[in-house]
Amino acid sequence: MSEEKAIKIVAQPALTKIGDRSVSTIGFRTPLALQHLTEDHNETEWCSPECMGKVMFGRKTARNSESIRKRIPNIVKGFLSKGLFLVVEYNWSKHGQIQAMKIYQGEGGLEKQAAIIQLDRMKRRKELTDANIRAASTILGIEWPKD
């Protein structure tokens, strides 16, 4: 009797172009979020959770948008490991709901202010380790106070 070995085929995550839009072939993955922000938004444009949800899950629904919002802390950590910072803009009239995101470009003004507010919020919620906070403050070019 011969032994048969099962071969497991693992799908590689990728963004596929369908017409003029990108769609994930395997659902949400942090590298695909980075690819979407760099290729489809040219790293300078803001991306809404609805847009990211449509790319990652194929449909623009409230459930998909909320799923993206819940993944933001992990996306930020994944980007920090690559030396990038994901700036998140909050809508304070909707109780701090995330309304947009983009890769930090080192610009001053509103982008840097949003990044500092986000970093402070994530620190208070204990969503980032001290090492991640130090990495983020280095990327942002700020001196983060120690408590």
Image: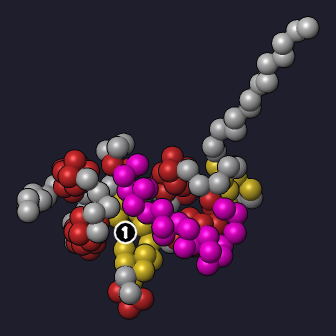
Residue 10 image-quadrant placement: top right
Coordinates of residue 84 in the picture (x, y in percent): 34, 49
Q: Residue furthest front?
A: 1
Q: In this view, does 94 lie to the left or right of 2?
A: left
Residue topped by disc 1: 88
Q: Which residue is drawn at 64% across and 49% down?
A: 15
Q: Which of 106 and 26 is in front in this view?
A: 26
Q: Residue furthest bottom?
A: 93
Q: Is residue 16 left or right of residue 74?
A: right
Q: Can residue 32 be seen in this view?
A: yes
Q: Can residue 103 be seen in this view?
A: no
Q: In this view, does 85 lie to the left or right of 142?
A: right
Q: Main secondary structure of the magenta part?
A: helix
Q: Nearer the viewer, residue 116 or 10?
A: 10
- Asked if residue 95 is positioned above or below residue 124 in the image, the reply reads below
Residue 1 image-quadrant placement: top right
Coordinates of residue 32 in the picture (x, y in percent): 55, 50
Give the amino acid at mark 1: Val
How many numbered dots are placed on residues in this image?
1
Q: Which residue is drawn at 12% across and 59% down?
A: 144
Q: What element carries label 1?
A: strand
Q: Nearer the viewer, residue 132 or 93?
A: 132
Q: Which residue is drawn at 67% across and 56% down?
A: 23
User: Mark 1, residues whose alpha carbon is within 10 Å: few (<14), some, or many (≥20)?
Assistant: many
The residues colored magenta run 57-78
Q: Within the magenta stretch, is there residue 58?
A: yes
Coordinates of residue 103 in the picture (x, y in percent): 38, 58
Q: Within the magenta stretch, is there residue 103?
A: no
Coordinates of residue 63 in the picture (x, y in percent): 62, 74
- The quarter in which the C terminus is drawn is bottom left
Q: Which residue lies furthest to the top in this view?
A: 1
